[in-house]
Amino acid sequence: MKILLTGANGYIGMRLLPLLLEQGHEIVCAVRDKNRLSVNARMLERITVIEIDFLQEPEVSKLPEDLDAAYYLIHSMTSSTSDFDEKEELSARNFNIYLKNTYCKQVIYLSGIVNEENLSKHLRSRKQVEDTLYEGNFKLTVLRAAIIVGSGSSSFEIIRDLCEKLPVMITPKWVTTRCQPIAIRNVLQYLSGVLGNEACYNESFDIGGPDILSYKEMMLRYAEIRSLSLTILDVPVMSPKISSYWLYFVTSTSYKLALNLVDSMRIEVITRDTRLQELLQITPLTYTEAIKLAFEKIEQNQVVSSWKDSMISGRFRKDVSEYIKVPEFGCLKDRQTIKLDNPEQALENIWSIGGNRGWYYANRLWKIRGFADKIFGGVGLRRGRTHTNELYEGDSLDFWRVLLADKKEKRLLLFAEMKVPGEAWLDWEIDDNNILHQTATFRPRGLWGRLYWFSMLPFHYFIFEGMIRNIATYNPHKNLS
């Protein structure tokens, strides 16, 4: 089948793409910025990538007419706290217009469980998108899930952050709200199982795992699996806004996402709908099994995708790929070079930078900078990285975004998504003479931008010098001095 995959660079889309290719389908990936589609060259050769922003006026000629099916995996919850629901409805309406000019028979939409009248704004928006898609000239299949548990999923990573960092928690009342978590493996089975299945046309199914747990029970069970000591004290007086800030500072989530999550966590999302489970003969994994499988992937460095890769700073209205050409004029630069004795190891060190490895020098100062970024509403360092030693264009890397990752040409280019009064790039390249070039570029915005750069010069001098020196000499089997 020829399938349109929207949201292809999102957490679910990145998991679903290789599965559909394995099943022999022809895939057309629709993304806003093709440079942020983090797939390897081999996979890129097997797919068609088109750039579409479903919030803009439709250009119907962009889509091939001979589509058989489509996956609708678009959401705007991380981009806004006020009008994301309007954006999601507009996106769905434009999607219908695009597909009106194709032969697409089926659209599959992954939504959220809606089984209460008093829904959160997020769940109301999900239901509105569902109603809008039902207006399209295709057969719609809706899968409604609660929280999804898997390596790199937002739910898993937030629980992981909380439990690994806080042995004692004072939590708001919503931790007693019950939900029905589902393993990412089962979600993918459902998404692929309904494809082309006429029994699923114009049907909405709830999907969930076998366990009904409160958020408190999920955290305690996680701590038990990880052999962690955890005490949770819930109080009824913590406001949604305070709860959101609490999540924002302790976990990797953005404030916008935290606020929307907290709003949804007061609503029970439970299903006893087993129709699809019985139709597709799927045995759902328990919450414990899902957590253990997630850690198997993490320990084997096989995390396919992370929700953090879709988190991008709201400072930039343009696609990040438009910053790939590093400017030369009107910029302030710090240039460092060093002769390499072991260029192969240095290249591996560059490709492993950030995340748990850190930044090779003054990691405490990098953490302070990340915390300051969080204070001012930035993404902070907690996004980390998806893989320990692999990088692709579009990946998030702490508070940077990968613009170029060409291992053959021995060059890595990062663009800053931290809060700064200007635009910043960090560039490494190893030349034919085995000399490593490291260039930090800053294009200041007004007087404050220049004051920022010059105030940071004393730190830049020893941080960047120490960083390139340790990249050149670091042995992964020894600790940095």
Image (cartoon, grey):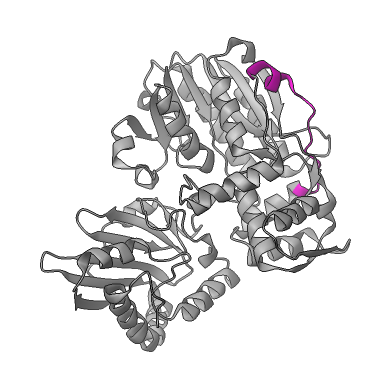
Disc count in the image?
0
Please tell me whether residue 276 belongs to the stretch shown in magenta: yes
Residue at the (60%, 26%) spot, across then down: 190
Q: Position of residue 85 (x, y in %)?
A: 64, 41
Q: Position of residue 158 (x, y in %)?
A: 64, 56
Is residue 67 in sight in this rendering?
A: yes
174 on left or right of 365: right
287 on left or right of 380: right
Is residue 311 in sight in this rendering?
A: no
339 on left or right of 322: left
Quadrant in the picture for residue 142: top right
Please tell me whether residue 4 belongs to the stretch shown in magenta: no
- Using the image, determine if residue 369 lies above or below residue 111: below
Q: Quadrant of the N terminus?
A: top left
Q: Position of residue 137 (x, y in %)?
A: 55, 15
User: Which residue is nearer to you in this view: 300 or 141?
Assistant: 300
Residue at the (69%, 22%) spot, across then down: 277
Residue at the (57%, 71%) spot, across then down: 376
Q: Quadrant of the C terminus?
A: bottom left
Residue at the (33%, 86%) spot, across then down: 461
Quadrant in the picture for residue 241: bottom right
- Using the image, determine if residue 76 lies above or below residue 314: above
- Using the image, determine if residue 268 lies above or below residue 444: above
The extreme left residue here reads 433
User: Which residue is nearer to you in this view: 235 or 96?
Assistant: 235
Magenta part of the chain: 265-280
The extreme right residue here reads 236
The extreme top residue here reads 198
Q: Position of residue 323 (x, y in %)?
A: 32, 57
Quadrant in the picture for residue 410: bottom left
User: Which residue is nearer to you in this view: 332 or 390?
Assistant: 390
- Using the image, determine if residue 269 lies above or below residue 224: above
